[in-house]
Image (cartoon, rainbow, N blue to C red):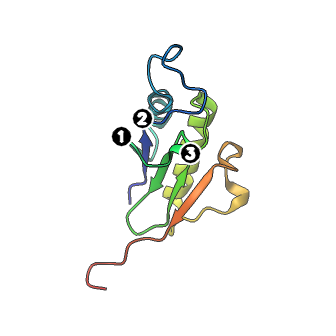
Amino acid sequence: MTTWITICDTCKRDDWDEATHSRSHGEDLAERVERHAEGRNVRTRRVSCLMGCGHGCNVAVQAEGKLAYTLGRFTPDDEAAAAIVDYAELHAQSETGQVPFKQWPQGVKGHFVTRHPPLPHTGD
């Protein structure tokens, strides 16, 4: 089962300013997450808006048949990107998508926004 990291590439944190930023914080984070995910057991994709603007920068970690999570309030840097990818790999290794708190990378603690149960199987 593939775990996906969906990265909002339009996120702008509160300090974003057209005069000082040439692109969105989401683009910066997406680039770093993609780089950290290379050769790892997760896949990435970008979307334009996860509708979590009050929590930017946002990502979703999800896989078919597993719990899905939205995380936000990241600084678009390599430390955050590495923690997101590390957490997504733990999600991939978990049968249900739930990762015990003690295994969470420090960089994702305090960044969880929502948890979604898996969709019911077709025909349920």
Q: Amino acid at mark 2?
A: Thr
123 relative to 112, above or below: below
Sequence-first disc among 1 and 3: 1
* Residue at which label 1 appears: 48
Residue at 51 percent across and 29 percent down: it is 25
As measured in the structure, the alpha-carbon distance from the residue carrying label 1 to the one carrying label 3 is 15 Å
Q: Quadrant of the C terminus?
A: bottom left
Sequence-first disc among 3 and 2: 2
* Residue at which label 2 appears: 10
Q: Quadrant of the N terminus?
A: bottom left
* Circle 1/circle 3 CB separation < 8 Å: no
Element at badge 2?
loop
Residue nearest the observer in this picture, 118 or 8: 8
Quadrant of the image occupied by residue 55: top right
* Circle 1/circle 2 CB separation < 8 Å: yes
Q: Position of residue 102 (x, y in %)?
A: 73, 58
Sequence-first disc among 1 and 2: 2
Residue at 52 percent across and 50 percent down: it is 88
Question: Left of 90 or right of it: where is 64?
Answer: left
Q: Mark 1 or 3, which is nearer the eye?
A: 3
Q: Amino acid at mark 3?
A: Gly
* Circle 3/circle 2 CB separation < 8 Å: no
94 relative to 121, above or below: above
For mark 3, does the 10 Å Cα neighbourhood hold few (<14), some (14 to 19), or many (20 or more) residues? few
For mark 1, does the 10 Å Cα neighbourhood hold few (<14), some (14 to 19), or many (20 or more) residues? few
Q: Position of residue 10 (x, y in %)?
A: 42, 35
As measured in the structure, the alpha-carbon distance from the residue carrying label 3 to the one carrying label 2 is 13 Å
Q: Amino acid at mark 1?
A: Ser
* Residue at which label 3 appears: 54
Residue nearest the observer in this picture, 7 or 20: 20
Question: Left of 31 or right of it: where is 83?
Answer: right
